[in-house]
Image: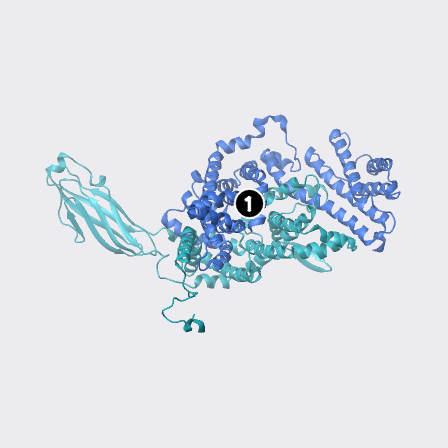
């Protein structure tokens, strides 16, 4: 950038100010060092996070099935006919060749075999050549389902009879290259078309948002309440704080299976308690029943039972996180604010409403956004609790369901693309709403 | 609604409510602890709590003497017994009399103590809004403590208890939470014995520990220099970078699973621990880097400059000055990464097929079949939970500081 003062300086004098765009040698060294220190991180994040992200788009427009991950290979077996009893006898070696794949062509098939000493070929197939005892056959391209019997006649000589070895004892090697569906240039729009055509997709989307919104809100409200409880000092407070963090610290498989056992309709304790107390007549299948119908003001309503139960699990498991952050924020509110309010005659609820809540609002909104995204991304919890049955299938479970349970990787990747785009929208919100300087 | 603002009425309502809550909690606890099907009478609880409160609040706060307190407790006891015709828990007294006696005493003590905590200094006359809300907050907090504690403790207790019982026993009486110690320790922990012999959980434990510790080391190895660079060195794009690090953390694992599965299958990395050890650090490095750089930034820069002046290299500065100063942060990041790796389920489940290299998460999932009795599943859950809980409780202070000071987590 040149300014008026720059141009006024005579060319012989050194320029007083370096242009901003170029770095000095010290700065350059420093930034080179910085990039060097960050390089390993960049490398691993690029390969394991960013590359798969792009690869996912690629897979989503390809007709890939789980079985396609193992590329087809040519198959060959060897048989020997005839008897080698005397010099001049003729034996036949037969290679049975097959392409077992039903849809893929195998190119450049090459067969290698070593013949025993003392056997001379009568007439060699024109695709084959023999150097010493090494037989090499270039068999070209095999169509799907191709099969052939390649015959080779051999004359027995004395050298063979002196040391008879079956031709089958040598290693038969056959190689070929098949087109890999993952790297080929066949594309399809079928994956996306099938997703958006299915009526199920919109219900999955709706379940995902219900789960995300209520799960997040539940975790935050419980966290706020728990933080309020522990924001006074009393004996055993440290103990309770540690205890309240348990659901979050324990492995998800452990707590998810415990909930399944606890809420089991036949041997579950909760149902047994409810029955014993006379609350319900027959056990409730919390994770297996899609909806409970009931009448309210003359309206028949369906309460989505299984979905509500997984939302309750979500709120239970993640309230400790918001509890921790909200408590930390509450403890940094200066006590004199409350003292002043007290003198002014503010009631406890007023103090909460007008002092505590505004003070924790910042952390609350950031937590909401983060938890919203993380809940949206969550797969393990629902997968372990219900497997996506009974109206609890979210987008993430759908990715697994399509990609692995139905073995259609392409369709799974297409759902993952939808997940990704919803997420990009959230991330933009995150960028807009986090404070410019040091978010948390 | 104005009536409730009169101290005496509010006190009675609070007393009745505590009576009901006490009855439910003690009744259910009795059922679970003794394995006898109690049906607590909620009405009797409400009346007893109400009368206890009435006696407690009969005189103004200054004149509520010890005698009144004792009278209140006695009244609760008498009313509970009388209103239920001497069957406070709907059971004949001959059935487990000692359990019932303990439960009854416990019930009276709970209701009495709750009344005392809530009502001792509450006036009987008309309450100001302030006084009324103080009472309301007390009751709400009390309920909150009970509900939260039960909600957290119950599942963990069920986990341990189920692991100590046989399937038939569980099906026969799901209400029996008692642990029968008389059968001998060997029998009691038989599920664990089988878990470590037949189901090879010793091996899984070792593999989980190996994977988690390696993940921690790899993560620190990558993220410490990276965090230092972001915190201290100037380079173009630094601001953008430090803000986008966390974005990586928002990429859902499920989106990565299909491509990684495909590529790792072709490279032969899928069913191997190496595969896991590539994926785990990649997902933990960004958040670790973010947490550490926040901490590094808070350290006084002058110390490092002094080190550089005295002839230390950058590496020397990091090793001799920055790291020792940020040991608490490094420890909390390490713990946090350990927790993530130990608890990780999705990639272990998708990638690992051979039982030889199961992690604990993967091992527990393999127990979730109709052929394996429930107690093994729960014993597996306990084995997976105990190490991480012990480590967490040990270092809780560290972790809590690190989590809330440096940053975030999901």
Query: Where residue B299 appears, x then y in whole percent?
Result: 53, 49
| Relative depth, front residue between B101 and A128 | B101
At mark 1, the secondary structure is: helix
Instruction: Please say whether residue A3 is visible from this viewpoint.
Output: no
- Chain where mark 1 sits: A
B116, above or below B301, in the image: above
Q: How is the image coloured?
A: by chain
Q: Name which residue lies at 36% across and 62% down.
A: A186
Q: Which quadrant is the N terminus of chain B positioned in? A: bottom right
| Relative depth, front residue between B265 and B36 | B265
Give the chain ID for the blue colour.
B
Please tell me how crowded label 1 is: few (under 14), some (14-19), or many (20+) other residues with Cα within 10 Å.
many
Number of marks drawn:
1
- Tell me which corner region of the image, top left, top right, bottom left or bottom right, holds residue A204: bottom right
Left or right: A336 as drawn, with respect to A145: right
Give the chain ID for the cyan colour.
A
Query: Where residue B86 appears, x then y in whole percent?
Result: 81, 34
Q: Name which residue lies at 64% across and 31% down.
A: B179
Residue pointed to by mark 1: A252
Query: Where residue A50 appears, x then y in whole percent?
Result: 44, 56
């Amino acid at each position: 950038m040149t300014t008026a003062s720059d141009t006024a300086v005579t060319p012989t004098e050194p320029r007083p100010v370096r242009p901003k765009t170029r770095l000095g040698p010290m700065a350059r060294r420093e930034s080179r060092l910085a990039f060097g220190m960050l390089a390993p991180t960049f490398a691993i994040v690029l390969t394991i996070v960013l590359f798969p992200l792009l690869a996912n788009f690629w897979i989503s427009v390809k007709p890939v099935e789980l079985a396609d991950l193992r590329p087809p290979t040519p198959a060959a077996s060897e048989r020997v006919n005839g008897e080698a009893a005397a010099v001049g006898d003729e034996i036949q070696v037969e290679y049975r060749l097959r392409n077992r794949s039903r849809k893929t062509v195998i190119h450049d098939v090459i067969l290698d075999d070593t013949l025993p000493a003392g056997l001379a070929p009568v007439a060699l197939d024109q695709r084959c050549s023999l150097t010493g005892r090494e037989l090499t056959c270039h068999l070209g391209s095999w169509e799907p389902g191709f099969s052939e019997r390649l015959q080779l006649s051999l004359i027995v000589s004395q050298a063979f009879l002196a040391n008879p070895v079956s031709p089958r004892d040598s290693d038969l090697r056959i190689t070929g290259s098949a087109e890999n569906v993952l790297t080929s240039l066949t594309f399809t729009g079928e994956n996306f078309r099938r997703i958006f055509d299915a009526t199920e997709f919109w219900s999955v989307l709706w379940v995902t948002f219900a789960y995300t919104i209520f799960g997040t809100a539940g975790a935050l409200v419980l966290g706020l309440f728990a933080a309020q409880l522990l924001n006074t000092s009393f004996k055993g407070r440290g103990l309770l704080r540690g205890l309240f963090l348990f659901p979050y610290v324990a492995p998800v498989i452990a707590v998810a299976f415990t909930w399944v056992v606890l809420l089991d309709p036949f041997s579950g304790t909760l149902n047994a308690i409810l029955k014993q107390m006379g609350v319900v007549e027959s056990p409730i299948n919390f994770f297996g029943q899609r909806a409970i119908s009931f009448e309210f003001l003359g309206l028949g309503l369906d309460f989505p039972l299984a979905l509500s139960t997984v939302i309750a699990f979500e709120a239970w498991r993640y309230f400790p996180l918001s509890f921790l952050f909200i408590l930390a924020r509450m403890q940094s509110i200066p006590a004199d604010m409350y003292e002043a309010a007290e003198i002014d005659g503010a009631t406890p609820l007023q103090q909460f409403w007008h002092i505590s809540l505004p003070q924790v609002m910042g952390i609350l909104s950031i937590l909401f956004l983060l938890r919203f995204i993380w809940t949206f991304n969550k797969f393990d919890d629902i997968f372990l609790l219900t497997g996506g049955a009974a109206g609890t299938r979210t987008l993430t479970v759908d990715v697994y369901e399509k990609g692995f349970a139905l073995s259609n990787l392409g369709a799974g990747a297409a759902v993952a693309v939808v997940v990704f785009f919803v997420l990009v929208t959230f991330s933009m919100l995150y960028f807009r709403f986090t404070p410019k300087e040091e978010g948390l | 609604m104005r009536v409730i603002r009169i101290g005496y009425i509010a006190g009675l309502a609070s007393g009745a409510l505590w009576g009901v809550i006490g009855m439910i909690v003690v009744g259910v606890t009795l059922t679970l602890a003794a394995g006898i099907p109690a049906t607590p009478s909620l009405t009797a609880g409400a009346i007893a709590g109400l009368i206890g409160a009435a006696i407690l609040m009969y005189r103004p706060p200054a004149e509520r003497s010890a005698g009144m307190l004792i009278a209140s407790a006695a009244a609760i006891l008498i009313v509970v017994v009388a209103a239920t015709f001497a069957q406070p828990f709907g059971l004949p007294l001959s059935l487990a009399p000692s359990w019932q006696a303990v439960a009854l005493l416990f019930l009276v003590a709970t209701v009495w103590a709750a009344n005392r905590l809530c009502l001792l200094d509450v006036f009987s006359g008309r309450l100001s809004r302030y006084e009324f809300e103080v009472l309301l907050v007390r009751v709400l907090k009390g309920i909150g403590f009970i509900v939260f504690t039960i909600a957290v403790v119950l599942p963990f207790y069920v986990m341990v208890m189920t692991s100590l019982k046989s399937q038939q026993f569980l099906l026969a009486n799901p209400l029996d939470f008692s642990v029968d110690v008389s059968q001998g320790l060997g029998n009691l922990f038989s599920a664990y014995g089988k878990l470590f012999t037949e189901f090879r959980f010793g091996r899984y434990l070792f593999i989980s520990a190996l994977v988690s510790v390696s993940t921690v080391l790899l993560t620190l190895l990558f993220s410490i220099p990276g965090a230092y660079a972001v915190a201290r060195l100037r380079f173009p794009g630094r601001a953008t970078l430090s803000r986008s690090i966390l974005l990586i953390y928002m990429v859902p694992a499920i989106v990565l699973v299909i491509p990684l599965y495909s590529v790792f299958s072709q490279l032969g990395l899928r069913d191997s621990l190496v595969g896991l050890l590539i994926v785990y650090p990649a997902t933990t490095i960004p958040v670790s880097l973010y947490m550490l750089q926040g901490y590094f930034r808070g350290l006084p820069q002058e110390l490092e400059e002094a080190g550089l002046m005295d002839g230390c290299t950058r590496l020397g500065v990091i090793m001799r000055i920055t790291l020792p100063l940020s040991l608490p942060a490094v420890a909390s990041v390490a713990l946090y990464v350990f927790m993530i790796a130990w608890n990780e389920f999705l990639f272990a489940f998708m990638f690992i097929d051979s039982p030889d290299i199961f992690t604990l998460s993967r091992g527990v999932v393999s127990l979730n079949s109709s052929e394996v009795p429930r107690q093994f599943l729960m014993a597996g859950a306990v084995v997976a939970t105990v190490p991480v809980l012990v480590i967490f409780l040990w270092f809780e202070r560290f972790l809590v500081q690190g989590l809330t000071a440096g940053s975030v987590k999901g």
